[in-house]
Amino acid sequence: MAHFFDMSRKAPAGELTDLSGGGGGRRERTLQRLQIGGTGVLLMMLLVGLASVIDDRATLTDATAVPEAAPTTEPTQAAQQNDPLVEAGVVPDLPAQPSAEPEASPTPLGSAANNASPPQ
């Protein structure tokens, strides 16, 4: 038969756990919380120490590295970059450097109409 939670019924004294009675249960929970907290603090200190060692090692490596080392191979001409869109004819081939001369700009319609002489 199923038992339901009944708020009107008082529980017998044997069913309740005694938290205030000086038993070891409260002390065990407190010790467990202290152990977990202490472990957390130690892990954080370990993590900060590890980060400090890594930072010191990186600083030492940067300090001992040659800033501008000579290349070990002979420099060569840069390979011509292939543009697949130009090869397919989709985009016109544009020069690498823009031309210095400006292109001719069209004159505005208003100035051309003002300079024209009226018909006679």
Image (cartoon, rainbow, N blue to C red):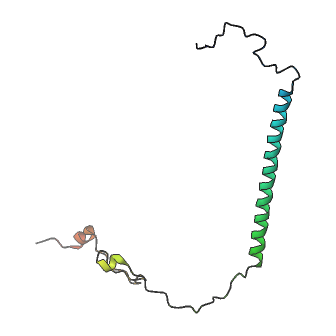
Farthest residue toward the front? 1
Q: Quadrant of residue 83?
A: bottom left
**Residue 27 shows in the view:** yes
Task: In the rendered view, tell whether residue 58 sits above or below residue 39.
Answer: below
Quadrant assignment for the C terminus: bottom left
Farthest residue toward the left? 120
| 35 on left or right of 100 | right
* Residue drawn at (83%, 27%) of the image: 25
**Residue 104 shows in the view:** no
Q: How many numbered badges does the structure rendering display?
A: 0
Place of residue 119 in the rendered image (x, y in percent of width and height, measured from the top left) = 12, 71
Task: In the rendered view, tell whether residue 35 sits above or below residue 2.
Answer: below
| 68 on left or right of 100 | right
Q: Nearer the viewer, residue 13 or 32?
A: 13
Q: Quadrant of residue 60?
A: bottom right
* Residue drawn at (30%, 77%) of the image: 88
Quadrant assignment for the N terminus: top right
* Residue drawn at (50%, 90%) of the image: 77
Q: Nearer the viewer, residue 1 or 88?
A: 1
| 3 on left or right of 93 | right
Q: Nearer the viewer, residue 66 or 72?
A: 72
Q: Quadrant of residue 23?
A: top right
Place of residue 78 in the rendered image (x, y in percent of width and height, measured from the top left) = 49, 87
Place of residue 95 in the rendered image (x, y in percent of width and height, measured from the top left) = 38, 83
